[in-house]
C-alpha cells in the first residue's frame, strides 16, 4: 500500500454521511490518489462535482473494489454485511460506519483517542461506533483511567441527520406543513418529528431498551474494555437538523471534584491512545 497516494472508496457516497466523509477527506488533505464513489444501482452513472473535478458514481459491487486500499462504508448494515468481506477479498481495508460488524469479537471497534491499539492484527474490517458512543467514549476513558467508573447513565438528544437524507427532508416538509396549517406526513418515523420528541430510536428489544440505546451500552463496554460496566441509556430523537447532545451522569469509584473532572475530560478529548485494562482478547491476524 502506497501511503502517499491511496485509492479510497466511499460506499454510500450520495448519502448524508458519505458526502460528509468526502468533505472531511478533502478538509484534512488525506492522501487520496484515486477517489472511487460508490452507491446503489439507482445512482450509478450520476456525477458529482468535488473541488472542481467531476466524478461519476459507480455501483457498489464486488469488482468495484479492485485496487482499492481503503473502503469507507456508510450505506447501512445490509450493504456492509454483504460487501465488506468482498472488499477485503479484493485487498481493501474496510472502515465500516454501520452496526453490521461492531460487536463481532474478531472485528476491532475503535475510537481513535481511546483504543487505537485494538487495530493491531485486524483481519480487514474495522468498525466505528454509533455517533453517540463516539463522542462519549473519550470522556469515559478519562474518568476510567483516573478515578474509575462505578456506573454511567446517559440520556441522548439525537438530531434527525442521524437517520439520513430522507429524514432531513421529512423534518423540513413537516415544518413547512405545520406553518401552512396542513397535516404533517410521516413515512421515515412512526410519528411526526417536527415540534416533537420521540423517545424511540429504532426498534424495542426484549430487554426493554431500544436497539439504539443498547448500542450505546454494549459499544461503550467493548471500546472501554469494561464488559461488566454498569451503564444505562435513554435515547430520544429531537427535531433538530444536525448535532447530537448528551447528558451524562457518572458515579466514579474514587471521589473527584467538578474542576478535576473537567480537566480530565479536556485531556480525554485531546489525548493520544492509552492502553486499556487487560480484559481484551488478542485479535486474530
Ligand atoms: N456511525 C454513525 O454514527 C452513523 C450515523 C449515521 C449513519 N450511520 C450509518 O450510515 C448509513 C448511511 O447513513 P446516511 O445518513 O448517509 O443515509 P442516507 O442519507 O439515507 O444515504 C444512504 C446511502 O446508502 C446508499 N445505499 C443504499 N442502498 C444501497 C445499496 N444496496 N448498495 C449501495 N449503496 C446503497 C445510498 O445510495 P443511493 O443514493 O444510490 O440510494 C446512499 O448513498 C446508515 O445506514 C448507518 O448504517 C452511522
Image (cartoon, helix red, strand yellow):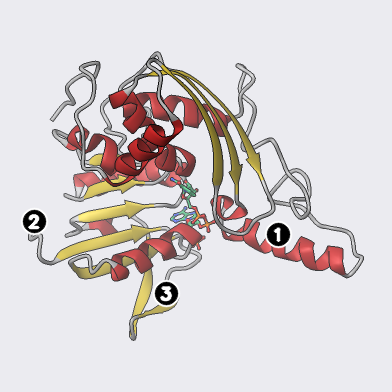
Of residues 167 and 152, which is closer to you in this image? 152
Residue 240 lies, in percent from the top left, at 65, 56
- Which residue was labeled with disc 3? 45
The CA distance from mark 2 to mark 3 is: 28 Å
Q: Residue at x 29, y 47 (%)?
A: 270
Residue 1 lies, in percent from the top left, at 8, 56
Q: Tell me if label 3 and label 1 are in contact, CB under 8 Å.
A: no
Q: Residue at x 45, y 42 (%)?
A: 77
Q: Is residue 258 visible?
A: yes
Q: Against 148, is 9 above or below? A: below
- Which residue was labeled with disc 1? 171
Residue 65 lies, in percent from the top left, at 25, 57
The CA distance from mark 1 to mark 2 is: 43 Å
| Crowd around label 1: few <14 · some 14–19 · many ≥20 (10 Å) | many
- The mark lying in front, picked from 2 and 3, is 2
The CA distance from mark 3 to mark 1 is: 29 Å
Amino acid at each position: 500500500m502506497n501511503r502517499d497516494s491511496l485509492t479510497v472508496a466511499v460506499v454510500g457516497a450520495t448519502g448524508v454521511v458519505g458526502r460528509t466523509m468526502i468533505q472531511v477527506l478533502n478538509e484534512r488533505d488525506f492522501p487520496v490518489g484515486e477517489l472511487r464513489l460508490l452507491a446503489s444501482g439507482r445512482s450509478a452513472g450520476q456525477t458529482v462535482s468535488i473541488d472542481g473535478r467531476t466524478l461519476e458514481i459507480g455501483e457498489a459491487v464486488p469488482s468495484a473494489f479492485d485496487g482499492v486500499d481503503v473502503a469507507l462504508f456508510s450505506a447501512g448494515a445490509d450493504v456492509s454485511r454483504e460487501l465488506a468481506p468482498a472488499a477485503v477479498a479484493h485487498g481493501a481495508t474496510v472502515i465500516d460506519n454501520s452496526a453490521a460488524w461492531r460487536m463481532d469479537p474478531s472485528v476491532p471497534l475503535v475510537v481513535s483517542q481511546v483504543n487505537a491499539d485494538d487495530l493491531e492484527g485486524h483481519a480487514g474490517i474495522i468498525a466505528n461506533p454509533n455517533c453517540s458512543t463516539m463522542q462519549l467514549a473519550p470522556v469515559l476513558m478519562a474518568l476510567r483511567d483516573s478515578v474509575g467508573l462505578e456506573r454511567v447513565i446517559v440520556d441522548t438528544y439525537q438530531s434527525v441527520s442521524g437517520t439520513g437524507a430522507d429524514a432531513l427532508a421529512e423534518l423540513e416538509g413537516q415544518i413547512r406543513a405545520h406553518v401552512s396549517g396542513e397535516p404533517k406526513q410521516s413515512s421515515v418515523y412512526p410519528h411526526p418529528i417536527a415540534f416533537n420528541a420521540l423517545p424511540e430510536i429504532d426498534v424495542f428489544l426484549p430487554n426493554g431498551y431500544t436497539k439504539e440505546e443498547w448500542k450505546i451500552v454494549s459499544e461503550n463496554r467493548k471500546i472501554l474494555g469494561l464488559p461488566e460496566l454498569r451503564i444505562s441509556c435513554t435515547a430520544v430523537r429531537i427535531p433538530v437538523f444536525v448535532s447530537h447532545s448528551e447528558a451524562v451522569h457518572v458515579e466514579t469509584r474514587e471521589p473527584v471534584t467538578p474542576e478535576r473532572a473537567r480537566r480530565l475530560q479536556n485531556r480525554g478529548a485531546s489525548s493520544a491512545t492509552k492502553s486499556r485494562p487487560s480484559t481484551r482478547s488478542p485479535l486474530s491476524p
